[in-house]
Amino acid sequence: MNIHEYQAKQVLKGFGAPVAEGVPVFKAGEAEAAANKLPGPLYVVKSQIHAGGRGKGKFKELGPDAKGGVRLSKSVAEVIANVNEMLGNTLVTKQTGPAGKQVNRLYIEDGADIDRELYLSILVDRTVGRVAFVVSTEGGMDIETVAHDTPEKIVTLAIDPDKGVTDADVEKLNAALKLTGGAADDGALLFPVLYKAFVEKDMSLLEVNPLIVMKNGRLRVLDAKVSFDNNALFRHPDVVDLRDTTEEDEKEIEASKYDLAYVALDGNIGCMVNGAGLAMATMDIIKLYGAEPANFLDVGGGASKEKVTAAFKIITADPAVKGILVNIFGGIMKCDVIAEGVVAAVKEVGLKVPLVVRLEGTNAELGKQILRDSKLNVQPADDLDDAAKKIVAAVGK
């Protein structure tokens, strides 16, 4: 689950991280009062959407010459003007796609005198099975570009979970970021704080880009992106309260109600599979034959008929879907349950696109018989390769 920048900063501030004063704004009429709560005379008006590249983004309604989604303002009057121009309009960034995202929230923040911009993130490094810091002196830039062009400027440091962030770790991080004096002292406080927040709140990503050294020599978290592990949200009702469903795909929201692992994609072949590995393989083979999957959907190993019905309805509700591939290898999941769910969903919502079904494993023959008896227009498949060929041919790529 993702949250907005201003929410992430409030979470980090609660652990002791240095962040600027700021006020979220939901209506244009709140701008003046919000700005007057801040010291000034420099303010920053930031679009709050779940996407990066906001500063370089463009508003659809304002034309190519308009300012981006993060704007400096040198007076309260300028803050008000920027809020009126930004709020409610559609911001397009490199991460939103051409459709963009409507800006329903803004964050007015106290400005900062920046000396240097650094990059810091914390994530789970699966190569070593530990939480790790990823830092670079090249903050404010796309970390992917830095990794590609100058990988030597990125330092990764895994943390021993039994020890936490040690003095030796702090020294390595300060050295990697070239922090000295007061900034190094701040680093010694900040790095353990961020690690503590990451672990205690079950985050999957904590990114500070940029982490700045101000002209007074102190550190400040200038931007913050935080994602949480959905599987741990039951431990954090305070985090769940931060969820902004307007930033999420409606199909993904519906899927979450049934505990389905669903991610919307840009293709036209809907997929319903059991098991994440098999789902990835199904998506790969669809691409191998020249088409694109419309979703990742794992119904899990023990799905009920109702859960399968819900999954099928979510797929068919996507207007981009021109064909559906059901690929089930029955272990714990029984193929007859899948078949019954598909039949129930089709009877409820209808079937307007080609459907290819591959069933193998527990009760596979019973599942196939249920589909045959239903009189649905279903193409059976012998194996995954056969299934992919048939659905790609059916939709004509």
Image (tube, rainbow, N blue to C red):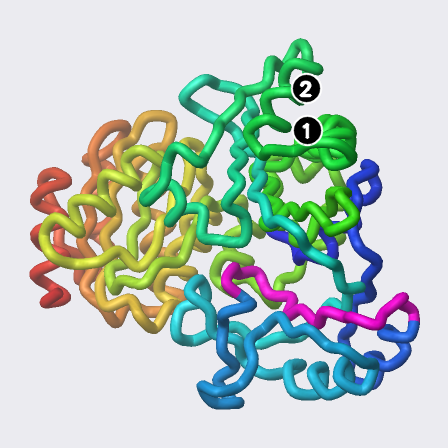
> From the viewer's perspective, is residue 8 above or below residue 42?
above
- Checking the image for residue 195, the label placed there is 1
- Report x, y in % for residue 190: 74, 33
Instruction: Say if the magenta span includes residue 38.
Output: yes
In front of the other: 215 or 272: 215
Say what secondary structure mark 2 lies in.
loop
- Report x, y in % for residue 42: 78, 70
What secondary structure do most residues of the magenta stretch adopt?
loop
Residue picked out by circle 2: 165
> From the viewer's perspective, is residue 393 above or below residue 40?
above
| Residue visible at 79% across and 44% down in the picture | 18
**Quadrant of the snapshot with the C terminus:** bottom left
In front of the other: 174 or 51: 174
- Report x, y in % for residue 339: 30, 46
> From the viewer's perspective, is residue 355 above or below residue 40?
above
Specify few, some or many for label 2: CA neighbours under 10 Å numbering under 14, 14-19, or 20 or more. Answer: some
Instruction: Say if the magenta span includes residue 376.
Output: no
Mark 1 in CB contact with mark 2 (< 8 angstroms)? yes
| Residue visible at 39% across and 74% down in the picture | 98
Please indicate whether residue 144 sits to the left or right of residue 23 in the image.
left
How far apart are labels 1 and 2 at the CA level?
A: 7 Å
> What type is the residue that disc 2 sits on?
Val
| Residue visible at 49% across and 27% down in the picture | 156
Please indicate whether residue 334 sits to the left or right of residue 155 in the image.
left
Q: Which residues are magenta?
A: 37-53
- Report x, y in % for residue 107: 73, 67
> What type is the residue that disc 1 sits on?
Tyr
Specify few, some or many for label 1: CA neighbours under 10 Å numbering under 14, 14-19, or 20 or more. Answer: many
